[in-house]
Image (spheres, helix red, strand yellow):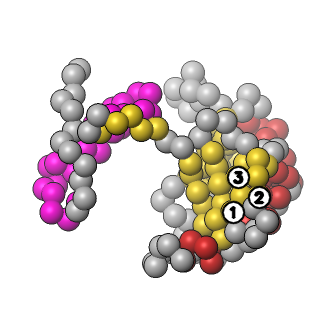
Amino acid sequence: MHWPELPLVITDLSRQSDVFFQYAVCRLAYTESMIFTARGKTMKLGYTIIYVPNVIKAVEYYERCFGIQRRFVDDSGDYGELDTGATCLAFVSEKLASSSISQYRPNTLHADPAGIEIVFVTDDVQTAFDTAVQQGAVAVMAPVKKPWGQVISYVRDLNGVIVEIGSEIS
Protein backbone atom coordinates (compact mmCIF):
# COMPACT_ATOMS: atom_id res chain seq x y z
CA MET A 1 0.00 0.00 0.00
CA HIS A 2 1.31 3.46 -0.85
CA TRP A 3 0.55 6.24 1.59
CA PRO A 4 0.65 9.82 0.32
CA GLU A 5 3.07 12.19 2.02
CA LEU A 6 1.79 14.04 5.07
CA PRO A 7 0.94 17.73 4.67
CA LEU A 8 3.26 20.38 6.11
CA VAL A 9 3.97 20.45 9.85
CA ILE A 10 0.88 20.78 12.03
CA THR A 11 1.16 23.59 14.54
CA ASP A 12 -2.36 23.58 15.99
CA LEU A 13 -4.10 20.19 16.04
CA SER A 14 -7.27 21.74 17.46
CA ARG A 15 -7.87 23.33 14.05
CA GLN A 16 -7.44 20.08 12.13
CA SER A 17 -10.36 17.80 11.29
CA ASP A 18 -10.80 14.47 13.05
CA VAL A 19 -10.38 12.74 9.70
CA PHE A 20 -6.98 14.38 9.15
CA PHE A 21 -5.85 13.48 12.65
CA GLN A 22 -6.93 9.85 12.18
CA TYR A 23 -5.08 9.81 8.85
CA ALA A 24 -1.90 11.14 10.49
CA VAL A 25 -2.09 8.53 13.27
CA CYS A 26 -2.65 5.73 10.74
CA ARG A 27 0.22 7.01 8.58
CA LEU A 28 2.63 7.05 11.52
CA ALA A 29 1.51 3.64 12.79
CA TYR A 30 1.93 2.15 9.31
CA THR A 31 5.59 3.13 9.06
CA GLU A 32 7.32 -0.13 9.90
CA SER A 33 10.80 1.23 10.50
CA MET A 34 9.70 3.80 13.11
CA ILE A 35 11.37 6.38 10.90
CA PHE A 36 8.99 8.60 9.06
CA THR A 37 9.19 11.59 6.77
CA ALA A 38 7.38 14.82 7.47
CA ARG A 39 8.06 17.80 5.28
CA GLY A 40 11.14 16.16 3.79
CA LYS A 41 12.93 15.68 7.13
CA THR A 42 13.70 12.22 8.46
CA MET A 43 12.81 11.71 12.11
CA LYS A 44 13.23 8.76 14.45
CA LEU A 45 12.20 7.94 17.98
CA GLY A 46 15.13 9.05 20.11
CA TYR A 47 13.99 9.10 23.74
CA THR A 48 11.29 7.89 26.06
CA ILE A 49 11.41 10.10 29.15
CA ILE A 50 9.62 9.34 32.40
CA TYR A 51 9.00 12.13 34.93
CA VAL A 52 9.90 10.87 38.41
CA PRO A 53 10.22 12.32 41.91
CA ASN A 54 13.81 11.07 42.25
CA VAL A 55 15.97 10.34 39.19
CA ILE A 56 18.78 8.58 41.07
CA LYS A 57 16.33 6.22 42.81
CA ALA A 58 14.65 5.46 39.46
CA VAL A 59 17.96 4.71 37.71
CA GLU A 60 19.16 2.49 40.57
CA TYR A 61 15.79 0.71 40.62
CA TYR A 62 15.92 -0.07 36.87
CA GLU A 63 19.51 -1.29 37.24
CA ARG A 64 18.50 -3.60 40.08
CA CYS A 65 15.13 -4.85 38.77
CA PHE A 66 15.80 -5.10 35.05
CA GLY A 67 19.59 -5.32 34.78
CA ILE A 68 19.77 -2.20 32.60
CA GLN A 69 22.97 -0.20 33.05
CA ARG A 70 23.03 3.54 33.45
CA ARG A 71 24.45 5.56 30.62
CA PHE A 72 24.49 8.89 32.39
CA VAL A 73 23.16 10.79 35.42
CA ASP A 74 23.83 14.52 35.57
CA ASP A 75 25.43 16.08 38.64
CA SER A 76 22.20 17.81 39.70
CA GLY A 77 20.33 14.48 39.80
CA ASP A 78 17.56 15.97 37.65
CA TYR A 79 18.26 13.87 34.55
CA GLY A 80 19.46 10.33 33.90
CA GLU A 81 19.66 7.87 31.01
CA LEU A 82 19.80 4.09 30.80
CA ASP A 83 21.77 2.21 28.17
CA THR A 84 18.79 0.78 26.30
CA GLY A 85 20.10 0.76 22.73
CA ALA A 86 19.04 2.99 19.87
CA THR A 87 16.10 4.52 21.73
CA CYS A 88 17.12 5.92 25.09
CA LEU A 89 15.03 5.43 28.22
CA ALA A 90 15.57 8.50 30.38
CA PHE A 91 14.26 10.00 33.60
CA VAL A 92 13.66 13.66 34.41
CA SER A 93 12.87 14.97 37.88
CA GLU A 94 9.32 16.25 38.35
CA LYS A 95 10.89 19.54 39.43
CA LEU A 96 12.73 19.94 36.12
CA ALA A 97 9.74 18.71 34.11
CA SER A 98 7.54 21.32 35.80
CA SER A 99 9.83 24.08 34.55
CA SER A 100 8.87 23.14 30.96
CA ILE A 101 5.49 21.43 31.22
CA SER A 102 3.03 23.33 33.37
CA GLN A 103 0.52 20.51 33.88
CA TYR A 104 0.81 16.74 33.85
CA ARG A 105 -0.30 13.85 36.05
CA PRO A 106 2.61 12.52 38.09
CA ASN A 107 3.21 8.76 38.03
CA THR A 108 2.45 7.04 41.31
CA LEU A 109 1.71 3.54 42.57
CA HIS A 110 -1.30 4.98 44.42
CA ALA A 111 -3.27 5.79 41.24
CA ASP A 112 -4.20 4.08 38.02
CA PRO A 113 -1.17 3.85 35.72
CA ALA A 114 -0.77 6.12 32.73
CA GLY A 115 -1.87 4.67 29.39
CA ILE A 116 1.64 3.81 28.29
CA GLU A 117 4.12 1.04 28.95
CA ILE A 118 7.85 0.48 28.75
CA VAL A 119 8.77 -2.86 27.13
CA PHE A 120 11.94 -4.85 27.77
CA VAL A 121 12.58 -7.82 25.49
CA THR A 122 14.37 -10.94 26.75
CA ASP A 123 14.79 -14.61 25.89
CA ASP A 124 13.89 -15.68 29.46
CA VAL A 125 10.74 -13.82 30.46
CA GLN A 126 10.02 -15.93 33.56
CA THR A 127 13.47 -15.33 35.10
CA ALA A 128 13.39 -11.61 34.28
CA PHE A 129 9.88 -11.29 35.74
CA ASP A 130 10.87 -13.18 38.92
CA THR A 131 14.00 -11.05 39.34
CA ALA A 132 12.07 -7.81 38.89
CA VAL A 133 9.48 -8.83 41.47
CA GLN A 134 12.15 -10.04 43.93
CA GLN A 135 13.89 -6.66 43.55
CA GLY A 136 10.74 -4.63 44.29
CA ALA A 137 8.62 -4.43 41.13
CA VAL A 138 4.89 -4.91 41.71
CA ALA A 139 3.58 -7.97 39.83
CA VAL A 140 0.63 -7.18 37.57
CA MET A 141 0.54 -10.27 35.33
CA ALA A 142 2.79 -13.34 35.45
CA PRO A 143 4.24 -14.53 32.13
CA VAL A 144 1.73 -15.94 29.63
CA LYS A 145 2.19 -17.15 26.07
CA LYS A 146 0.07 -15.31 23.51
CA PRO A 147 -1.43 -16.97 20.40
CA TRP A 148 1.12 -15.20 18.19
CA GLY A 149 3.98 -16.91 20.05
CA GLN A 150 5.13 -14.06 22.28
CA VAL A 151 5.50 -14.51 26.04
CA ILE A 152 4.55 -11.38 28.00
CA SER A 153 4.30 -10.28 31.61
CA TYR A 154 3.65 -6.99 33.38
CA VAL A 155 4.96 -5.25 36.48
CA ARG A 156 4.70 -1.71 37.81
CA ASP A 157 7.85 0.16 38.77
CA LEU A 158 8.49 2.15 41.94
CA ASN A 159 6.59 5.11 40.44
CA GLY A 160 3.67 3.07 39.11
CA VAL A 161 4.77 2.95 35.45
CA ILE A 162 3.73 -0.22 33.63
CA VAL A 163 6.70 -2.28 32.45
CA GLU A 164 6.17 -5.20 30.10
CA ILE A 165 8.77 -7.95 30.17
CA GLY A 166 8.34 -9.98 27.01
CA SER A 167 9.94 -12.08 24.35
CA GLU A 168 10.34 -11.14 20.70
CA ILE A 169 7.19 -11.63 18.65
CA SER A 170 7.59 -14.89 16.79
Q: Nearer the viewer, residue 112 or 102?
A: 102
Counting residues from the N terminus, which is met first, the one under dot 2 or under dot 3? 2
Identified at 69% across, 63% down, the residue is 79
Residue ID for mark 1: 79
Query: Magenta span: helix, strand or loop, mainly?
Result: helix
* Residue to which mark 2 is pinned: 73
Q: Tell me which corner region of the image, top left, top right, bottom left or bottom right, holds residue 152.
A: top right
**Left or right of 79 in this view: 56:** right
Secondary structure beneath label 2: strand
Instruction: Measure the C-alpha gap from mark 3 to mark 1.
Output: 7 Å
- Amino acid type at circle 2 is Val
Residue type highlighted by circle 3: Glu
Residue tagged by mark 3? 81
Instruction: Answer whether residue 98 is magenta in the image.
Output: no
- Of callouts 2 and 1, the N-terminal one: 2
Q: Amino acid at mark 1?
A: Tyr
The mark found on residue 34 in the picture is none
Residue 161 placement (x, y as % from top left): 62, 61
Q: Secondary structure at mark 3?
A: strand
Using the numbered discs, state the Cα–Cα distance from disc 2 to disc 1 in whole angstroms. Answer: 6 Å
- Marks 2 and 1: CB-CB under 8 Å? yes
Q: Which contiguous range is marked in magenta?
A: 13-37
Q: Crowdedness of circle 1 by 10 Å Cα count: few (<14), some, many (20+)?
A: many
128 w.r.t. 94: above or below:
above
Mark 2 vs mark 3, CA separation in Å: 6 Å
Are circles 2 and 3 on residues that touch, CB within 8 Å?
yes
Image vertical order of residue 35 relative to residue 137, above or below: above
Residue 160 coordinates in the image, percent (x, y): 65, 66
Crowding near pointer 3: few (<14 within 10 Å), some, many (20+)?
many
